[in-house]
Image: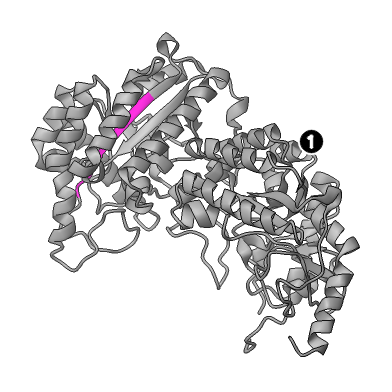
Amino acid sequence: MTLPANYFDYPYRRPGMDHDRYPYSNLFKRKPVLWPAGARIALWIVPTLEFFPLDMAPKGVKPPGGLERPFPDYWNYTLRDYGNRVGFARLFRALERRGLKASVAMSSRLAERYPHVLQEVNRLGFELIAHGIDMHHIHATGIAREVEREWIERCLSTLRRLSGQPVKGWYSPAYSESGDTLDLVAAAGCNYVCDWVNDDMPYQLQTKTGSLCAMPHAYEISDLQIFHFYKYKPAQFVEQVMDHFDFLYREAAASGGRIVALSLRPWISGVPHRIAAVEHVLDRLARRAGVWSATGSEILAAWKAQQ
Amino acid sequence: MGTEDPGLYDYLPYYDRPKITWPGGARLAFWCAPNIEHYELDPPLNPSRTSWPRPVPDVLHYAWRDHGNRVGIWRMMDAMDRYGVRGSISLNVAVCDHFPEIAAACRERGWEFFSHGIYNTRYTYNMSEEQERAFIEDVKVSIRKWSGQELAGWLAPALTLTERSMDLLAEAGIIYTLDLFHDDQPLPVNVRSGRLISVPYSLEINDFTSLFQGNATPRDYTDAIKAQFDRLYQEGADNGQVMCLPLHPFLIGQPHRLRQFEAALDYITSHDKVWLATGREIAGYYLTHHYDAFQAAIAAGKKRGEA
């Protein structure tokens, strides 16, 4: 066997990244950030409300939780829908009772289908993040640019119209992007994305169309990773989120304000046997001095003002 | 193809072999091998293996790994510094080109640089002999350039090899391979010319196989590290042992795992008769003091018809 000669070409083997979306940056060489009121931790809670259509075809990038059984997959359709009917209500109440803010990522189809959910988002003063049309519209290479542009505009215009919010945050379904996604969401008026899990603080992305930042969306302690993929128990979720928090809380004393992002899907976290663990974590975080509960836009604005 | 045995080593009974001693009367040589890697966003295709589970750009998986170089490595390094544990880095050498400050930090600490190929997305599979020789040479030159060290150790990029790899490594003057998992002690490797030994790495207490593929919680992982240590330390009273702790900054450098990592280092370094070594030091000591006795024992076993 022989590999083609270009297998040994290394076009980006020089200082910097192998793409031009952002430069390399060592977290510990950046200017420390100060959060309002001297808080050490900005607590960014991101309930993620996803609509999985019954007729979604299992092809391309498979979204976690997608319907993969033969049609009609009532098993998975109703389990996901449970989150948007029951689970989210439990989760929102847990946040409301503790006076915590949230940035709710939502499929635009869900906002259209279940107006009550969106009313609750607004009633509680939560920020809305665009999370695509639904979990069948996965942004990935292979989708024509004009098609993707239309998806993004449809999602954002629907959410903005129905909520009355400016909707500045974007979170691609399944954290999946094409090479155009960042340019398209910046052009559509977003100023942050939640798909890049390579940092613990915000950083500036380069786009051809507008100013866009990556917000640190802590994938490893998301309920998706902890419960759905790693299959950990609720007590292990508590341990790991608290370990994550404690570590960053201490790091913040020397290195400046940090962010703890909690990515929660009500079809995972909002079920009866797990919600107590989530509430327990929220109790412990809400009680700590030096924790600033904020939306993504508030955290980003505070960070940007110091760059 | 068509061989049922790689032919790289001969049988040697575990409990009846020459006695390994380590410097200072240590029972155990402990070494820590962080994998310092870069996974290209858009690598060329190798016919035997794709690089990403999703279409390029696979933002989720790329960013997850990139966290190691921006954030995780610095936390991991800080913990190792505090426990006096030097690293022997399993290095994708292109990391030095992309992120010179990472190379500088490892060099300043006196850490060993050994080869993990050029990128973790350039596999050895399907290379011709000539291509593989040139590939090894590229790594040797890079490691000399960035560390001033002569390359001694090799862990194949993404553990991808050809049937010729061990012969070519020996001919290139490499001293030890980490791709063989057949034993807990260093052993001679059969190569067509030159001299090569295997040094124990680990796919059991590797953070990748344990935390990531094996769904171990951070506490499970620390328990496994301690148990591995306890048994090897115990057996090391009779015959010197080697324990390797292989790491990936994108996993161990996550906030929720670092305290557990520190607990593991604290446990290991609180014992006496532990030689905190590098891969090169272990291989060099074995070659000087034990290699001949092991070769003789293997030859004697063959003569007696044991192997």
Q: Which residue type carries mark 1?
A: Glu
The residue sitting at the top extreme is A37
Residue located at (57% from left, 30% from top) = A27
Please state which of residues A294 and A166 is positioned toward the viewer in this rendering.
A294
Query: Residue A170 appears in which quarter of the rendering?
Result: top left
Tell me: residue B21, above or below residue B255. Answer: below
Which residue is at the front of the view, A279 or A21? A279
Q: Does B199 appear above or below B230? A: below
* Residue at which label 1 appears: B108
Where's residue B77, x and y in %? 66, 37
Please identify the quarter of the rendering in which residue A28 is found. Answer: top right
Give left or right: position of B225 versus A137. right
Q: Main secondary structure of the magenta part?
A: strand
Q: Is residue A253 magenta?
A: no
Q: Position of residue A230 (x, y in %)?
A: 38, 52
Residue at position x 56%, y 59% from top? B204
**Along the horizontal axis of the image, is A301 left or right of B75?**
left
Image quadrant in which the N terminus of chain A is located: bottom right
Magenta residues, as a range?
A43-51
Where on the picture, by quarter, is residue A22?
top right
